[in-house]
Amino acid sequence: MNLQPLYELQERLEQAAVAGTNLLGEDFRLKRAMEGLAPLAAASPVFAKIGAALEELLSAPPQGRGGVLLDTLALVDAVVYTQGKTGCPGTLEPLPHGIGTCQPLTYTQLGPLLAALNGTGSDRYNTSEEFWNTHPEYFTDYRVLPLLVKGLKDTGFCMAERNRDRLIQLGTLSFPLLKADFDPAGKREMVFRVNILDKVAGAAENDFYRAQLPHAKREVRQALIAALRHDPANLPLLLELCQKERAGKNQDQAWKTLAQLDHPEVEAVLYELSRKDWRQLLYILDYTPEPIASHLTVRLFEEELAPFEAEPERPLTEENASRFSTLLHRLKEKTGPEVCQLYRHAAALAPVLERSLDGSGQTPNCMRFSHYTALNSDGLLFGEYLGWILANTLMLHPDRALCALALELYEEYGTSYFIPALTVQLLCLDSAECYQWAEAQLPPDGPLRRWMMQAFVWILGYLRWSPEKETYFFHQGCYDYQVEFHWYDNYIANLDVRWFLLLTQNPDPPSALWRELLLYREVIPGLSPQVLEFLYGQIFQGLDFSPTHNIIDILHTQGWSDWDDLVVKLAKSRAMQRVGIRPGHIFSFLDALPVPPKQKAAQLQKIDQLVLARKLQTEGIWPRDQVQEHIKQWRQQASTPTN
């Protein structure tokens, strides 16, 4: 069907809309277009309707032609748009491999995602996250996938990291794009490309890693060296790199990668390194879960213990203490039968290593190890530190042998191994049995009870609540073979409700503990009113905004009802501690209170009067206009009837 008359008619009507309707009757081009439209009108009702509209336009009186012209033009435009099409000459061919798939998606559907991946707006991260969560298939489209690769150099908030993670989840689809213009001397973008190939393909891309390595520099070289761990055939190359790389991160990475190859020659080379640079070897073995790392760590630890087993009165030096501190730290995450035997041996020798050297009964300071869990500035004794390392390892890897070991050491040596024993009971017993066991260990009073109460706080502080599973889990993380941090979540059989009442007896429970244990929980059946009263008192102890807000949220969720003048009391407690109140905090606290608007207005009014009377100190200028506006709004809300 020849539509040229239709297009000519559209052009003449547009001209008439610009020039005016006075000369329509004399427009011979319009009449010629009408004549050309006649065959179309005979063949289609739509074109017949256009012909009738044209006749009406030309027969209309001059003063009425404007409206008819616009109606006719609108009809013609609508028909023209329905005939539109796009395309180019040639035959359809599949897209080249590796640039994405052809999804049946319009630009309207993809537009916001394309803008988020290719733009500079502040909300791009949230937009791309929303698309990933609702339409992950969009990211395989040939218009989107190249932008993900390009976005590996995006400087926006976490955009490059998030694009890397998505490309990993998409598998091998982007590999040709990742390798097409790879620059081994490049920057972070190229590091991310290697990370993706490494995570998804492993040894399958070993030829690529090796081909790029001769020209690679800085962090890209480090990432390529790390990727060599997948193929045992890289052993000779890694041995060469360990010797020839310049001292620094790349050489360290070569050693770390070598340590992940399970081969007798590797162990021999690493042990030889310990003869030259003992600390470098332990640094290499840190956070390395392979059996060879455990074996070498045990071997070096036993070598340090041997002289003191042979000669219990042997003097302890600063160098001894430094080595033991390093070995204890590197023992974290190490597992296996020989590791269990090392714990037994080290625990048996702990009294030798903790002894007084001058008859004073005091362990020398060099054998007290600094640790954030220490009750005092003196640090932890050898056995206590050993127990903490075991507890932290159990949170990451709660295997049966380690669990049995922790209980064995606690039964044999007592308090130093209480913390790993408690960790095991949380992991292995049901909630009631675990609480009963823990409560039975507590003496009625004295320093040991206070220490154990603090131990409860430390261990429970590693727990996080899972709304999905409705229980708690140990939340710990560690670094793996390169720069990534991995979380290990090991679930427990919830917490007996009696724990919360027991924790209120701690003389100084950190607000962070309550925030982690209770903030995201629904109503807890059987929760003691004393716990809520304790938390209410905690509101007036701290000075920080977030913990205070969190406790208010917890109390609200758990059914607390005494909100009378809470924010007024809070402001006064700040004054007692000689701390100024912040207007924004006051507004936020009042907003969070589950009380009627009238009560919020009354509390803010009292605080305003106290500020004017100079009985409350403020940080900055007290914004009376904003205060009065808040009071006015709450009073209006109170006076507005609700349906």
Image (spheres, rainbow, N blue to C red):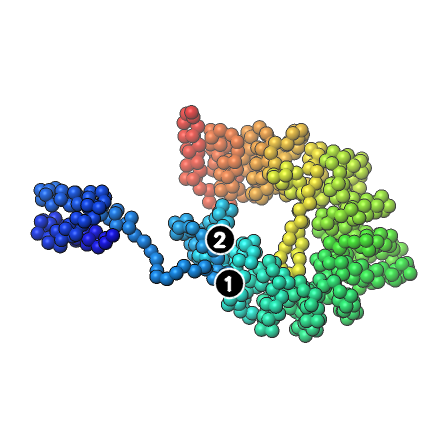
The answer to which of marks 2 and 1 sits earlier in the sequence is 2
265 and 125: which is toward the camera = 265
Amino acid type assigned to the residue bearing label 2 in the image: Phe
Q: Nearer the viewer, residue 565 or 417?
A: 417
Quadrant housing residue 326: bottom right
In the rendered image, residue 60, in percent from the top left (x then y), is placed at 10, 42
- Residues 136 and 246: in front is 136
Q: Which mark is residue 139?
A: 2
Image marks 2 and 1: residues in contact by CB distance under 8 Å: no
Q: Which residue is mark 1?
A: 177
Q: Residue at x 56, y 30 (%)?
A: 563
Q: Using the rendered view, name the quadrant where residue 203 is placed.
A: bottom right
Q: Which mark is residue 297?
A: none
Q: Position of residue 475 (x, y in %)?
A: 66, 47
Q: Specify whether 252 is left or right of 190.
A: right
- Residue 395 in sight here: yes
Q: Residue at x 56, y 56 (%)?
A: 171
Snapshot quadrant of residue 234: bottom right
* Residue at image coords 32%, 53%: 85
Position of the C terminus, as image quadrant, is top left
> Residue 160: percent from the left, percent from the top?
52, 58
Residue 480 in picture, x, y percent from top left = 66, 57
Tell me the kind of residue under disc 1: Leu
Looking at the rendered structure, the secondary structure element under dot 1 is: helix
